[in-house]
Amino acid sequence: MNANQGISIIIPTYNSRDILKKTLDSLVDQYLSKDKYEVLIIDDGSSDDTRSMVEPYKSIINVSYFYQQDSGFRVAKARNIGIDSAIFNRILFFDAGMLASPMLLQKHYVSSLSNSSGVTIGMSYGINEFTTENSEDLVGILEKNSVADAFSVMKQNTQLFDCRYEYLKSINFEINTVTVPWILCWTSHLSCSTEIIRELGGFDEYFSSWGGEDVELGIRLFQFGCKFQLMDSFESIHYPHYKDGEKRKETAKQNIDYIDKKHNLHATKLMKNHGWQEVIRLA
């Protein structure tokens, strides 16, 4: 077995100290052996002293902290710092505020053994593209239950399911039947080969506003020949935090224009006027 077989978890953050702490707490309590994963926190210029919150975790799990000056939204650059620094052969992109089930890393690890060059997409409770619907219900469950127990409770409430769930259920979760699987490539919970993503040059650092940098990377992973697969269970929770939905729609539109100019695909043109489900249907 490759000596560097394991998971490097890349988490960009910006002034999210409190919800990042919840993420780290969930990553401490993992079934996967602690010598098989590392956590890379890349701070995109926070002013909330995130560093001091992260420091105590270094005695519990393998955590590295990186800081880049605040020069605006630079999540692509932040993730690339993590990619360059990763020591394991598999990268898991995870966001600040994502809560991991105890089995999450084990499942990504097993997936990497059977599909080392593939891309694994994970679904999450509480994921919506632009809104924070059902936030109160989700927070209420987390306040009354441990993270591990919350998964069992949320399983009974379809309103909390990932916004991609109903579509994926309609295709029996066989993402390999989708002609443009990259449009479902959202880095809130996604893993892929460290070697391949480095060969592709990581994220395009043109992106300096929210939306699209993960889908654009997905296009290149797909064109490289990576097979996309779906994790067959919910192993993460998206802890609610404020989103400016209208602003996100505006910046996403600008970034879609850039993606289309870069790749000039039928599907990227469809993205200008259609949501992801319509793009899948029409592509």
Image (cartoon, rainbow, N blue to C red):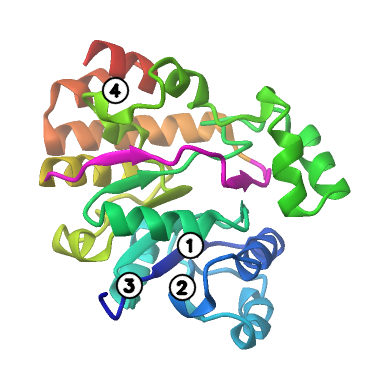
Q: What stretch is highlighted in magenta?
A: 225-242
- Mark 4 vs 1: CB contact within 8 A: no
**Percent x, y of residue 140:** 84, 40
Sequence order check, earlier mark of 3 and 2: 3
Which residue is under mark 4? Answer: 271
Q: Where, quadrant-wise, is the C terminus in this rendering?
A: top left
> Label 4, label 2: how many angstroms apart (C-alpha)?
36 Å
- Mark 1 vs 3: CB contact within 8 A: no
- SS class, disc 4: loop
> Label 4, label 3: how many angstroms apart (C-alpha)?
37 Å
- Mark 3 vs 2: CB contact within 8 A: no
Is 190 or 251 nearer to us in this picture? 190
Disc assigned to residue 5:
3
Which residue is under mark 1? Answer: 12
- The amino acid sitting under disc 2 is Tyr
**Percent x, y of residue 174:** 34, 27
Which residue is under mark 2? Answer: 37
Q: Nearer the viewer, mark 4 or mark 2?
A: 2
Residue at 58 percent across and 80 percent down: it is: 61
Q: Nearer the viewer, mark 1 or mark 2?
A: 2
- The amino acid sitting under disc 1 is Pro
